[in-house]
Amino acid sequence: MDKLRFPFIRKLVHSSSLDLLGAALIFSVCLFRSFHETIYYQGEIQFGIPIQELWSYVMKGAFPLGIFSTVGAVFSLLSTRLIGKQNNIGNVIGVLTTVNSGVIDFMFGNASAIITYPLSFFIMTFAVSKWKGGEELKSRDWRYYLIIGSGMLLGFILVYLGAYLFGGRTDTVFLNVVAITFGLSIGANICSALKYEETWLSWIVYNIVQLTKAILQLNLANVVKYIFYLFNAAITLVDWLSNGDVKNEMQAVKS
């Protein structure tokens, strides 16, 4: 039976305790900072709405932005962890959280979310189909670089086009941060769907830039989430590169 090069790293990647730690960390910080008291009402974000008054605001047409953002952050984390474990359920959850994230991103001023997140939804659905069909880990080739480059180009085109068509925040720094993160996510998600071993290198860069984006949006839940994501992406990169496909490990155990 072939031995794993870094069994401790694989244990971390597949650790249920680390799943719970990440989810609890995000949820606790959101509660501590009362992020659940944030709503989108009458065309603007409002903070500090007492929990007992939330329902009355919802009945008036308010969107409980903080609650959806917190729940979305937790499930997005679990999706990423499951994908790192090479579990297709992570992709399925990712399809659902993409819808939630798109709505929240739009409300925080990213008008281009109207045209960018449908593409992300399609890519995540593609990933579900590819993994269900038995996609296996592979090393990078010329297609990997083409995907990364094309993703960045498409990211800038769609973000700036969305800002031009739909308005929202149009300051250069904000648009560039959004374009870079979206472009990275396009390439990383496609590479993830095709199970390239180097996928998580893209996610490391993505998470660094996402931290900047989250700070600009004053989205505390995402700030905490992406700090944890950096650590998770690093250990998962090592696991995919060094320890290989989970299916191979399972087959080795059976033999």
Image: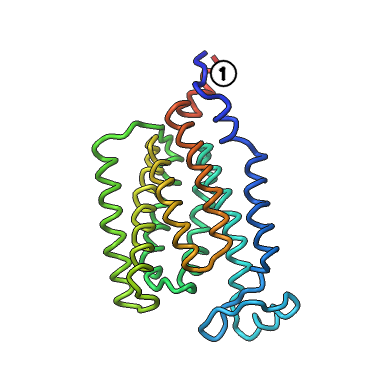
Q: Classify mark 1: helix, strand or loop.
A: helix
Left or right? Give the position of 175 relative to 74: left
Query: Is disc 1 surrounded by few (<14), some (14 to 19) or many (20+) residues within 10 Å?
Result: few
Residue at 26% x, 49% y: name it: 149
The residue that mark 1 highlights is 253
In the rendered image of this protein, does residue 8 appear above or below residue 118? above
Q: Quadrant of residue 155?
A: bottom left
Residue in view at x 42 percent, y 55 percent: 209
User: What's the residue at 49%, 64% (across, down)?
Assistant: 215
Q: Residue at x 41, y 51 (%)?
A: 206
Closest to the observer, 93 or 47 = 47
Q: Disc 1 residue type?
A: Val
Q: Is residue 246 above or below residue 192?
A: above
* Residue 216 image position (x, y, % from top left): 46, 67
Q: Give the percent coordinates (x, y) of residue 254.
A: 56, 17
Task: Tell me the quarter of the image containing the C terminus.
Answer: top right
Quarter of the view holding residue 240:
top left
Locate residue 63, reporting x and y percent: 59, 76
Q: Is residue 115 left or right of residue 46?
A: left
**Which of the two residues, 108 or 127, is positioned nearer the viewer here?**
108
